[in-house]
């Protein structure tokens, strides 16, 4: 049996890894500070601006909600493909 990832999966892995390096890891300090400030202000469960900014970048690159089963879009990741 061939358990090698497909070329499409490898390409997606690279895109996600590059996105993590460029946007997620650099935002960790900002995320932590914003979460601490919200917690101190009694707004612990308020949506974080840091997450919303990164989410928009991920959406623009087709990397948000990869397993979305929207009828408008084909699924980008399936359990079989993953």
Image (tube, rainbow, N blue to C red):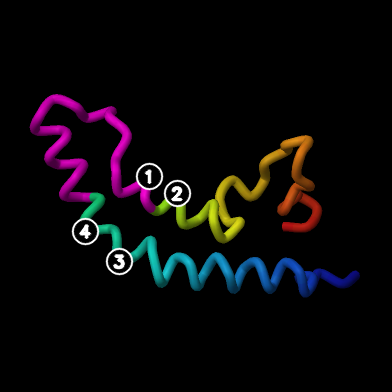
Tag nearer the camera, 2 or 4: 2
Q: Earlier in the sequence, mark 1 or mark 4?
A: 4
Residue, disc 2: 55
Secondary structure beneath dot 1 equals helix
The magenta-colored residue range is 32-53
In the shown orientation, is residue 57 left or right of residue 41?
Answer: right
Secondary structure beneath dot 2 equals helix
Q: Can you tell which mark lies on residue 29?
A: 4
The quarter of the picture where the N terminus appears is bottom right
* 46 lies above or below 64: above
Dot 1 and dot 2 residues touching (CB under 8 Å):
yes
Closer to us: 69 or 78: 69
Q: What's the residue at 37%, 50% (across, down)?
A: 53
Residue, disc 3: 26
Res 60 → quadrant: bottom right
Q: Determine the CA span between mark 1 and mark 3.
A: 15 Å
The quarter of the picture where the C terminus appears is bottom right
Name the residue at the left extreme: 40
């Amino acid at each position: 049996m061939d358990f090698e990832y497909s070329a499409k999966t490898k390409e997606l892995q690279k895109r996600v890894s590059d996105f993590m390096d460029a946007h997620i890891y650099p935002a960790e300090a900002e995320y932590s500070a914003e979460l601490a400030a919200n917690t101190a202000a009694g707004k612990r469960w308020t949506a974080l601006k840091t997450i919303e900014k990164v989410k928009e970048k991920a959406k623009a690159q087709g990397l948000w909600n990869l397993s979305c089963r929207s009828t408008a879009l084909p699924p980008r990741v399936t359990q079989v493909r993953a």
